[in-house]
Amino acid sequence: MAVRALAAVRGAVGFLSRIPVGNTEAGWEAFRRTPAAMPAAGYLVGALVALPVAAVAVAAGRGVAVPPETAAVAVVAWLYAVTGITHLDGVADLGDAAVVHGDADRRREVLADSALGVGGALALGLVVLGHAAAALLVVDLARLAPVLPVAAVGLVVAAEVAAKAATATVVCLGDAAHEGLGSALTAESGPRSLLGVAAVAAPVALLGWPALAPGLAVLGAAGAVAGAALWWSTARLGGVSGDVLGATNELARVAGLHAGVVAWTLS
């Protein structure tokens, strides 16, 4: 059991990021049968994504003032260097499908079209802008002493775990609209698998300790995105797909980061 769990997490890291862990058929099979591997991989991916934020905190502690705007750009660039841009393709495709007129069949045709339309361009711009704005807020937290730098790093990790948990939730509760990546994942999981996803993701609420509100806000925002993605894809596409899963990951991360910063501000 432990060997399969490790294989699933390794498969999740290889599939969900550009971390060179190696992709094997055994890892892929273990991963697609274990939705909880997604948030588990989020801890490692999130820790790597948070490195620029930690660097800003260290620099601030030594009296080096890094321009927050420059640091925010570096955070976003590093984010996609670690995670890749595959999920952004899902954002673009869903953006195009969301604005097209027609039924579910017509929207699925747009999803399969590799051309980028206005809806997709707008969706991409909003998601990247949302990440940049969130990065700026998190960088500002990282520059403050004494406890907020740790909280800023924790928020980045929590948002990555929550994004992966939101994607896993869609996998567990959704039905595939057609054969493909969506069906390869949803066919192997069901609502019962959510227990494992929740158990793996729940500890991120403690990353802002002693404050719990930020971590809970991150998880809550990501959960809301998962619910919205499930509802929209079922109503408008007839079910989930790989594009839906990728877009869920990106939107949940953005929502989680902003919700976490707001919770820190209010707490």
Image (cartoon, rainbow, N blue to C red):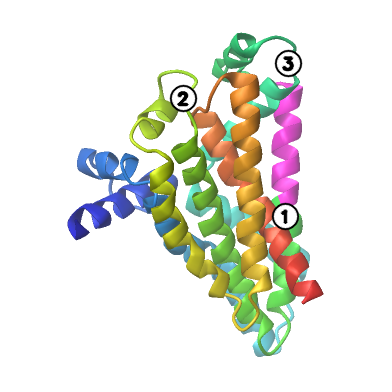
**Secondary element at tag 1:** helix
Query: Can residue 253 be seen by looking at this rendering?
Result: no
**Secondary element at tag 2:** loop
Task: Name the residue rendered at 67%, 21% in the picture.
Answer: 97
Identify the residue at the far front of this view.
192
Q: Amino acid at mark 2?
A: Ala
> In this picture, is 175 found above or below 226?
above
Front tag of 1 and 2: 2
> In this picture, is 131 found above or below 66?
above
Mark 1 neighbour class, 10 Å CA radius: few under 14, some 14 to 19, many 20 or more: many
Mark 2 neighbour class, 10 Å CA radius: few under 14, some 14 to 19, many 20 or more: many
Residue range in magenta is 117-130
> According to the image, label 2 marks what residue?
176
| Position in image of residue 19 (x %, y %) | 39, 54
Magenta span dominant secondary structure? helix
**Secondary element at tag 3:** loop
> According to the image, label 1 marks what residue?
132
Query: Within the image, what quadrant is residue 205 found in?
Result: bottom right
Q: Nearer the viewer, residue 76 or 2?
A: 2
> In this picture, is 126 found above or below 257?
above
- For residue 126: magenta? yes
- Quadrant for the N terminus in the image: bottom left
> In this picture, is 9 found above or below 242?
below
Q: Amino acid at mark 3?
A: Val
| Position in image of residue 210 (x %, y %) | 62, 84
Distance in Å between CA atoms under marks 3 and 1: 28 Å
Query: Can residue 110 be seen by looking at this rendering?
Result: yes
Q: Is 173 positioned to the left or the right of 196 in the image?
A: right
| Position in image of residue 242 (x %, y %) | 49, 30
> According to the image, label 3 marks what residue?
100
Distance in Å between CA atoms under marks 3 and 2: 21 Å
Mark 3 neighbour class, 10 Å CA radius: few under 14, some 14 to 19, many 20 or more: some
